[in-house]
Amino acid sequence: MQELTNKKKMLVMIALMATMFFASINQTIISAALPKIIAQLGGMTYYSWVITIYMLTSTISTIIFGKLSDIYGRKKFLLFGISVFLVGSFLTGLSGNIFQMIIFRGIQGIGGGMLMSITLTAIGDLYPPEERAKWTGTMMAIFGLSSILGPVLGGVLVDFVAWKWLFWMFLPVGVIAFVMIWRMFPKAEGNSKESIDYLGSVFLTITITGLILGFSWAGSKYAWGSPQIIGLFTATLLGVIMLIIVESKAKFPIMPLSIFKNKGVTISNVASFVMSGGMMGAMSYIPFYIQGVKGMSATQSGLLNIPMSIMMIIFSALSGRWLSKTGNYRLFAALGLGAMSGSMVIMANMNNVVWAAVSLIIFGVGLGFGMTVFTTAAQNSSPPSQLGVVTATCTLFRNLGGTIFIAVFGSIMNASIASNMGKAMASGAGPDFTKLDGATAEKIKTMATPQLLLDKNKLEAIQASLPSQVQQIFVDMMDMVRTAMGQALSWVFYIGAFLLFVGVVLSLFLKVKPGGVAETEPENKDNEDDDMEMVS
């Protein structure tokens, strides 16, 4: 496809960007609206499944269909992915109860996983290695734009129109993207001599399912040491063992183990894993500081994220162009992850909202640099026949990093808050409950939860409803919880900063060849000449 004229390539890229926007805006638009949707549908107990099922099906489809696109070509799976996503979005809007929504969101996830990975893979098909970073950066900027527009639109629309329109209003964009891909995307065939690795797909699905469900539920739905979580992690371990055995013997493996012998791919995958893990420490837990510790509203918290997203969009686009010109993967990866790590050190020590805003702006700059590098480095380290599975694997590691560390950070924060509150009470620094009768004291103590800090209106209503002689003790108690949360978040941010620093160290091992192409280690001797010709 690299033989296409620049004009035709540009038209194809417009189609791919429309596809990326359609997939990403439909995912981000429901984040702010989901609580109200669940309140209308009922089934609050199953709230997390609406999020988890999408994450699960999209992650599985990313790697499976990434490989299938190597075999059968990208175009048919782009069209299939758009169709599945359109159907899933339409059905989700028709959901009459929480269980229907969970099923239809799962269908959406299958389509979304295909689109998010194959659109990035197609860049590798269209452009030579030295030009890929520029377009990957542009694609990441499209994703960043949807991360700004989505939550704002979702929050506003759910207050004024029926929630089903959140899923239906962008269906025309999907139809336009389908027509554009169908008309403009070249019909290039893959390596159709290969066959589907069914057994490998089964064990890959078992591995991903056990891992995502284990970390999604551990510390929240079930205790870390519960039989359910131990069972899921056991299934994951057995799945990994069987996957390695099956893939080492398969003629055409769904996840070729040989790609991990390639340093460019392996380093990019591991760096994407720790980058995503550290990133989620900031993006998921900074609202706890803004709303819980500083007592600001959810709207104000969302507004503080906008400058970060804008910086990410700007520097994703710019870094892609700069990387295409210089090819210095080490520099851009180290700059991006270094800025993110430094910003999280600021978060760990901030004492006001101004520093929170500064840290988020720096984080956005780093994110813009880091999001582009590793996918491009992995693609440029691989032969054309493996672009789909390599890009999908990079996406897989990024998804797993975020999933795993959200759970880990949550457990660290909860344990640290409990420990800090226990120390405060033992030292006498907490509220003086001896001024209250036993029943009132116990009632007030049950309100000492971090969740209450996150609902400013409810907190103020409870305080106003208390007798005057109890209000000051309640205020003192919530100040204790607020301090405990702030101290716990510092640990979360420090650990996130450390993870990102590990990513900086890993990025220094990325090898760069003249012309901006990461060094490749060929799969085998027979392919050595072809692979080296590809990257030179």
Image (cartoon, helix red, strand yellow):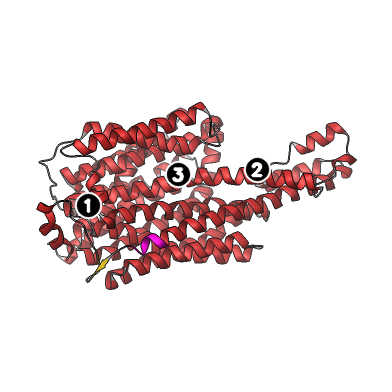
Q: Which residue is mark 2?
A: 451
Q: Which residues are magenta?
A: 505-509
Q: Describe residue 249's horizontal placement relative to residue 204 as left or right.
A: left
| Badge nearest the viewer, 1 or 2 | 1
Q: Please report the residue visible at 25 percent of the width from the left and 51 percent of the height from the top.
A: 261
Q: Describe residue 518's horizontal placement relative to residue 90 as left or right.
A: left
Seen from the viewer's position, the closer of residues 270 and 108 is 270
| Label 1–label 2 contact, CB within 8 A | no
Q: Secondary structure at mark 1?
A: helix
Percent position (x, y) of residue 335?
Answer: 42, 68
Q: Please report the residue visible at 22 percent of the width from the left and 57 percent of the height from the top.
A: 124
Is 507 within the magenta? Answer: yes
Q: Please report the residue visible at 35 percent of the width from the left and 45 percent of the height from the top.
A: 171
Q: Earlier in the sequence, mark 1 or mark 2?
A: 1
Q: CA distance from mark 1 to mark 2?
A: 45 Å
The three-letter amino acid code for the residue at tag 2 is Gln
- Classified by dominant secondary structure, the portion drawn in magenta counts as helix
The three-letter amino acid code for the residue at tag 3 is Thr
| Badge nearest the viewer, 3 or 2 | 3
Seen from the viewer's position, the closer of residues 249 and 515 is 249
The tally of labels here is: 3
Q: Which residue is mark 3?
A: 403
Q: Describe residue 334's horizontal placement relative to residue 439 as left or right.
A: left
Percent position (x, y) of residue 449?
Answer: 69, 41
Instruction: Please identify the quarter of the rendering in which residue 474 is found.
Output: top right
Neighbourhood count class around disc 1 (C-alpha, 10 Å): few under 14, some 14–19, many 20 upward? many
The three-letter amino acid code for the residue at tag 1 is Leu
Q: Which residue is mark 1?
A: 387
Percent position (x, y) of residue 111?
Answer: 31, 41
Seen from the viewer's position, the closer of residues 265 and 395 is 265
| Label 1–label 3 contact, CB within 8 A | no
Q: Would residue 2 be visible to someone looking at this image?
A: no
